[in-house]
Image: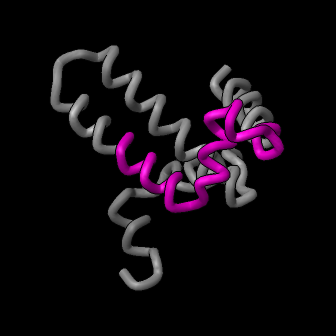
Amino acid sequence: MATDVLAELAKILEQRKRADPAQSYVARLYAGGPDLVRKKIGEEATEVVIAAGNPDDAALIHEVADLWFHTLVALAARGLDHAAVLAELARRFGVSGIEEKASRPGQ
C-alpha cells in the first residue's frame, strides 16, 4: 500500500509542475525554487525533532508525513523519483550502518 500512495503522490507532484501557483501549494513551492523547498524541509525536520521529544505519537506521525511530503517535492523538482530512494534503502539491507557509512567516499 505504501508504494501505491507514493506512486500516486508522485503523479500528482508531476502534474503540479504545470499548475498555477496561485491555485496549488506544490506549484507555489516549485515556483519558489530550490531555496523555498529547502526551507520547508528544514522547518518540517525541526518539527519532527520537536515531536519526537514529546509523547504524542499522532503528532510525530503527522510531522513525519509533512517531512516526507516535502522531501518528495524536492525529489520531483529535480526530476528524481521516490523509487530511487526505495532502491537505495533496499541496497542497504543486510549491511551494517557502520560499514555502509564507512564505504562512502571521503569517510
Colour mapping: one colour
Does residue 23 belong to the magenta stretch?
Answer: yes
Residue drawn at (70%, 30%), measured in percent from left and top? Answer: 23
- Res 56 quadrant in image: top left
List the single residue furthest toward the front: 22
x 83%, y 44%: residue: 18
Q: Main secondary structure of the magenta part?
A: helix
* Image quarter in which the N terminus is found: top right
From the viewer's perspective, is 91 left or right of 42?
A: right
- Residue 103 lies, with reference to residue 71, above or below; the image says below
Residue 52 rendering spot, x and y as whole percentages: 23, 31
Image coordinates for residue 79, horizontal then vertical, percent: 75, 57
The range drawn in magenta is: 15-44
| Residue at point 42%, 53% (across, down) | 39
In percent of the image, x 46 and y 32: which residue is there? 66
* Lateral position of residue 13 relative to residue 25, left or right: right
Compare residues 42 and 60 and report the one nearer the observer. Answer: 42
Residue 51 % position (x, y): 25, 29
* Position of residue 41 measured from the top left corner of the image (x, y, whole percent): 44, 48
